[in-house]
Image (tube, rainbow, N blue to C red):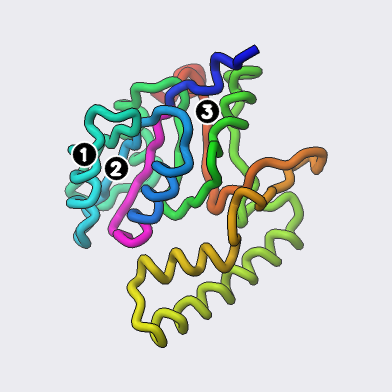
Amino acid sequence: MRNPYAMSSLSIITAIHNGLPMNRLYWKALSGNTAAPFELIVIDNHSTDGSEKFFKGLMEKNEKANQKVVYIRNEFNQSYPRSQIQGMRVAQNEILCFLNNDIWMPKQWELPFQTRLKQNPLLILSPSGQEAQPTQKRSNELKASWKWVLFFSKVWKQVLGKGEEERLWKALEWMYDSLESFKNPTVSHKETMNGIKGDSVVCHRDLPKTLGEM
């Protein structure tokens, strides 16, 4: 039987302040690996590096597609929580995803979250990414590996005269090869979820109302 919740639309809220190369890679991951329809709500806290032009271009290009971009610009660099609340207030879809712009995910990354939220819409879900493994030892190992990968990617960029976006892509490639095979253990250690590079929080849109935050 088909899970009717498995393709529920997502409202993905991302706050930025500059970081154009990372923003480009983030969109590449998000648009290429998300199966469900989504709106990406970008809260731009006064970027000055071309990120505004990039996301406005996506907003116009994807206006009628199932991957909609909503761009909101602030004239100052406000706090992260305030940015998330600002995004929540304009979100239109059933599931809220709070993602940073340095997240990298495998194909259909959202499906395990949707399945769990169907079982219990009051859950607050967050994958155990590189920064938050169930054991401190595993977390330290991944952080150390990423530190060396970043170092060598900078050398690679300088020697070959590559751009920053290419460097970040190469670092991710060296670190993970493919996130399709990168599995993260859950806190219980009894099962795994597809790996996600970076921390994120996913919940049903009714949960903030239940908690009295909106």
Give the label on residue 203, or none.
3
Q: Quadrant of residue 90?
A: top left
In the rendered image, residue 9 lying in the magenta stretch gets the answer no
Rounded to the nearest angstrom, the CA distance separating label 2 from label 1 is 18 Å
Q: Amino acid at mark 2?
A: Ile
Q: Quadrant of residue 38?
A: top left
**Residue at the spot of label 2:** 43
- Per the model, the C-alpha gap separating discs 2 and 3 is 19 Å
Identify the amino acid type marked 3. Answer: Cys
Judge left or right: residue 45 versus residue 94. Answer: left
> Which residue occupies 59% across, 55% down?
178
> Considering the image in quadrants, where does the C terminus appear?
top left
- Give the labeled residue for mark 1: 61
The magenta span reads 10-22
For image coordinates 29% across by 48% down, the residue present is: 78
Lower sequence index among marks 3 and 1: 1
Residue 32, percent across and down?
Answer: 43, 44
